Image (tube, rainbow, N blue to C red):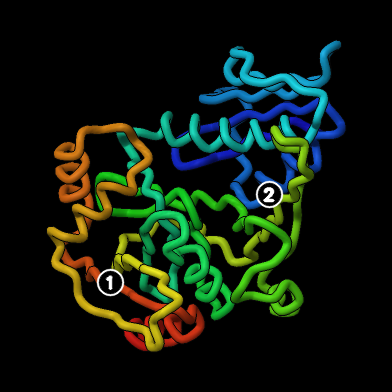
Amino acid sequence: MNPLRLEIAHLNVGITCSAKGCAAGIEALTQLFSRSTNKTNTDLSFVISACDGGITLHADGEKLWQSDDAGEVVAAFEWAFYNRTIAALYPQFLSLHASTFALGDACITCAGKSGSGKSSLCTAALLHGANYFTDEYTLLDKQGNITAFPRPLQWGGTTHPAFAQQGMIASGLFSQGSYAFTDHEGAHVESLLWHAKRVAKKPMPMDLLLLPCFDATVENTQIEPLPRSQALLELAAEMHHQLPVQQRIHELNRRLPDGVNCLRVLFSDVHQAWQQIESRVN
């Protein structure tokens, strides 16, 4: 695998992988990130190489992981790559546990805990022609703009309750990848990756903040306005940075544009929910 140089916001990230068993997984995880033309400066460096004990992962010269399971090293790289990158981007960028996509001129962020439905809403939006920013790490700068962090969409298995694999492929809007590893209990785990083909190229100001809540008992989608103060409280809980709560709220209040519309979305059917959201945007 040839060395990779990625451009993520203002960072140049270098990745070197000489362990053949890891190369395909590394390439699949980084496929959507912009390639950097800067060949001299590197802000973060990752090296995956073969050794007597198997395969090692180093970040900026620090040994992070060693294993004879290539997939396990790729999984360790994924965790280190995301976490070290968002740490290096702070304070210029806050990272929010949120998906973001753009439908026309509207930049929409869905924030919430795992299982709230944010990635499902993002997938529905992409299937209806939206441009992809991220499904996990929303980078919010000091001017209220969002910069793409296009990690692949990931399912926790090979199936999804709302989206059939064949339908995703037939749409022509995604390509598919994966990597596999053995977990600490000895079970085989496959991480299914979806690469959106429409990735946002330029930062955009956040226009709409959705706080989704998936509830299988709800018959019809419910969408209601949310006061900015309540939205800030809930959004503060979804920051990846370990900051005091008051500092989180203060930072978010300074960065979120004044005109951001905040909505609570309670739903059980992601397709129905997306139709209602799309009608509001259009």
Q: If the image is split into quadrants, where does the N terminus sit?
A: top right
Residue 14 horizontal side relative to residue 24, left or right: left
Q: Is residue 54 in sight in this rendering? A: yes
The vertical placement of 175 against 124, above or below, is above
The front one of 3 and 234 is 234
Number of numbered tags placed on the structure image: 2
Give the structural element (helix, strand or loop) at label 2.
loop
Asked if the residues shown at circle 1 and circle 2 are in contact, with their CB atoms under 8 angstroms apart, the answer is no
Quadrant hosting residue 52: top right
Residues at marks 1 and 2, CA–CA distance in whole angstroms: 33 Å
In percent of width and height, residue 133 lies at 49, 58
> Is 145 placed left or right of 31 in the picture?
left
Q: Secondary structure at mark 1?
A: strand
Image quarter where the C terminus lies is bottom left
Residue 155 horizontal/vertical position (percent): 63, 59
Q: Residue at x 33, y 44 (%)?
A: 239
Residue at label 1?
A: 264
Residue placed most toward the observer, 248 or 198: 248
